[in-house]
Amino acid sequence: MIMPIDIENKVFKKSKLGGYEIKEVENFLELLIVDYENLYKENSEIKEKLIRSEESIKYYDSLEQGVTQTIENSQKVADEIKEKAAIEADEIRKSARCESSFTLEEVKLEIRAKQIELEQIKQQMQIYKIKVSSMLEAQLKIIKEEE
């Protein structure tokens, strides 16, 4: 790529007859140098902005991957908790049938307590998902504002 200094240092050979007027060529070259320097600086600034934008995108992509992984892990934990609660509820039912010391009403109360516990865990999971989603939206808003 021709640098502004290359244009400035360009020397034209002088012909003996029919050559260009030197002052005119020099004036034109001066105008060309100014325009070219401006374009060169603008191009450099755009390249720097592009590099910063690409770095920001990489950062937010990695952040998004981390948040996605966190959500997936949270979902797995929630599923495991649900499964354990269901197994425990089944065990309670079986135990209630086998043991005469428990009344049907006590078993129903214990099952209801486990169901309430399960609902609370589901609510906590929903709140967690909303917080993570809000965080992602805030990060995306920051990215858009930077652009």
Image: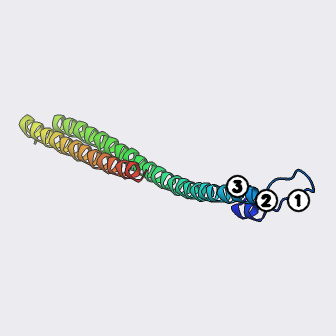
Which mark is on residue 22?
A: 2
Give the color scheme: rainbow, by chain, secondary structure or one colour. rainbow
Mark before the other along the chain sequence, 2 or 3: 2
Q: Estimate the spatial distance between the alpha carbons at disc 1 and disc 2, rounded to whole Å.
A: 8 Å
Among numbered discs 1 and 3, the one appearing first in the sequence? 1
Image quadrant in which you'd find residue 100: top left
Identity of the residue drawn at 48% across and 55% down? 56
Mark pair 1, 3: CA separation: 16 Å
Q: Are marks 1 and 2 in contact (CB under 8 Å)?
A: yes
| Residue closest to the eye, 108 or 133 | 133
Disc 1 residue type? Lys
24 horizontally vs 82: left or right: right
User: Mark 1: which secondary structure?
Assistant: loop
**Which residue occupies 71% across, 60% down?**
3
Answer whether labels 1 and 3 touch (C-beta < 8 Å).
Answer: no
Quickly name the residue at label 1.
Answer: 14
Q: Is residue 59 left or right of residue 114?
A: right
User: Could you say where residue 18 lies in the image, as x and y percent from the top left?
Assistant: 88, 50
Instruction: Give the residue drawn at x 49%, y 51%.
Output: 57
Front residue of 61 and 95: 61
Residue type of the residue flagged with mark 2: Ile
Residue at the far right in the pictured view: 16
Secondary structure under tag 2 reads helix
- Mark whose residue sits in front, 2 or 3: 2
Q: Which mark, by number, is residue 28? A: 3
The residue lying at 24 percent from left, 36 percent from top is 90
- How many residues crowd around disc 2 within 10 Å: few (fewer than 14), some, or many (20 or more)? few
User: What is the CA distance from the residue labelled 2 to the residue labelled 3?
Assistant: 10 Å
Q: Can you give x and y, in whole percent of width and height, for residue 35 in the image?
A: 62, 55
Sequence-wise first label, 1 or 2: 1
The image quarter in which residue 130 lies = top left
